[in-house]
Image (spheres, rainbow, N blue to C red):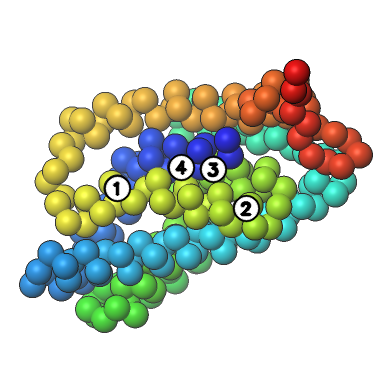
Amino acid sequence: MDFVTAFMIGLMGSLHCIGMCGPIALALPLDRSSLAAQLSGTFIYNSGRLLTYSVIGIILGILGKGVAFFGYQQIFSIIMGAAIILGAVLPYSFDRLVSLTPFMSKFLTRIKTNMGLHLKSKSMTSLLLIGVLNGLLPCGLVYFAVIGAITSYDTLSGGLFMFVFGLGTLPMMITAALSPGFIGIQWRNRVRRILPFFAILIGTLFILRGLNLGIPYVSPQLNPETDTAVECHD
């Protein structure tokens, strides 16, 4: 269930990725001499993004283990679900608010400066580093996935959650890099209107998960002694 959710967050929200990261994908210093060269360069770039996401997931999985150790899984899941729903209905995007903080403003400036330097080079190393830096850019979609990584309450599961999330973004990101005109603006805008409803659905799932209702896969009952989900079988 968790990894399906991770993939769907990436897949359904990948048009948001195009709006945020599309200009970077279009500006990639790819070797345009052949389709194979373009595909290999795009693969290296996206590998960098997935590497960053996975490392973030591992780190947040450690945080999640701490939450589980103190027995706060249920309340944490409910709070995070409510935060996702709140972020979906607020008129001002959370990633913009984050970027306005002094620390994040300086951090983003350094990322963009370094990214700009690597965009001038066609080496595979530069493509990898562009992807790594791209994965550090603030994005509301990534925040949803981050919450999922924390609520996995496990180091490896947190890393895998973010990795699978990244896999979900690949179809649109690869398309943006190779065929930027393939996705029309009108169709993109229509899908973006659906994204808040999708975010509300994800937030609701996190809340249900924290309510410990004993519903298999949706709201499994948590065993307080082992901190594991208990599935009921006839």
Q: Secondary structure at mark 4?
A: helix
Q: State the quadrant of the C terminus.
A: top right
Write down the residue under mark 2: 158
Between the residue at mark 1 and the residue at mark 2, the CA separation in whole angstroms equals: 22 Å
Kindly tell me whether residue 115 is visible in this rendering: no
Q: Earlier in the sequence, mark 1 or mark 2?
A: 2
**Quadrant in the rendering for residue 159:** bottom right
Q: Dots 4 and 3: beta carbons under 8 Å?
A: yes
- Above or below residue 180? Residue 29 is below
Circle 3 or circle 2, nearest the eye: 3
Q: Amino acid at mark 2?
A: Gly
Write down the residue under mark 1: 171
Residue 3 is tagged as 3
Residue at the outermost right position: 225
Q: Dots 3 and 2: beta carbons under 8 Å?
A: no
Between the residue at mark 4 and the residue at mark 3, the CA separation in whole angstroms equals: 6 Å
At a point 45% along the width and 23% down the height, the residue shown is: 197
At a point 70% along the width and 21% down the height, the residue shown is: 215
- Between residue 230 and residue 75, name the one nearer to us: 230
Q: Amino acid at mark 3?
A: Phe
